Amino acid sequence: MVILGGTNDIAENGGITTLEAIEENLQSMVELAQVNGIRVILASVLPTLDYPWRPGLKPRDKITALNRWMENYCRLNHLVYVDYYSATVDANGALRPELTKDGVHPNNAGYLIMGPLAEEAISKALKGRTS
């Protein structure tokens, strides 16, 4: 199972939440999957400088912190981490313009970058490797 989550929480789509609450939710998803024998891959949150539907939140630092937490959590728990962020970020910390129409969600060009990264991560998880 590939979990790509957190950006809607950071965007406060369901209300104001903390990074700790997002981390706990991701951890719960991982643990539930593992209890049921499902291999888990955590995916980084994609970069964005703002959410068009919730302007002014300045999510860059929260995204960076959440991605750092996920990468560390994966390392400590022998999970596969797929880093979409590094492959799609521009020099300003935004999703590269050619990879998106709204600055948040990937377009076809974005998915063409993400697809092979997901395939590699899935292959690692199926082989029981984390790096």
Image (cartoon, grey):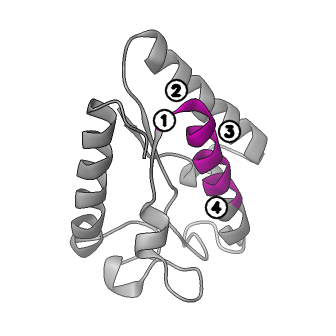
Number of numbered callouts drawn: 4
Q: Mark 2 near mark 1, Cβ–Cβ under 8 Å?
A: yes
Q: Amino acid at mark 3?
A: Glu
Labels 2, 1: front one: 1
Query: Is label 1 in contact with label 3 (beta carbons under 8 Å)?
Result: no
Name the quadrant containing residue 77.
Answer: top right
Range drawn in magenta: 65-79
Q: In this figure, which residue is indicated by the disc labeled 4?
A: 63
Name the mark nearer the viewer: 1 or 4.
Answer: 1
- Answer above or below: position of 97 versus 83: below
> Which amino acid lies under the numbered mark 2 shown in the image of this protein?
Val
Residue 77 within the segment the image draws in magenta: yes
| Residue 54 position within the rendered picture, expressed as x and y whole percent measured from the top left | 63, 66
Q: Quadrant of the N terminus?
A: top left
Crowding around mark 3 (Cα neighbors within 10 Å: few <14, some 14 to 19, many 20+) is: some
59 up-or-down from 78: above or below = below
112 left or right of 114?
Answer: left
Which type of secondary structure does the marked residue at label 1 adopt? Answer: loop
- Which residue is tagged 1? 79
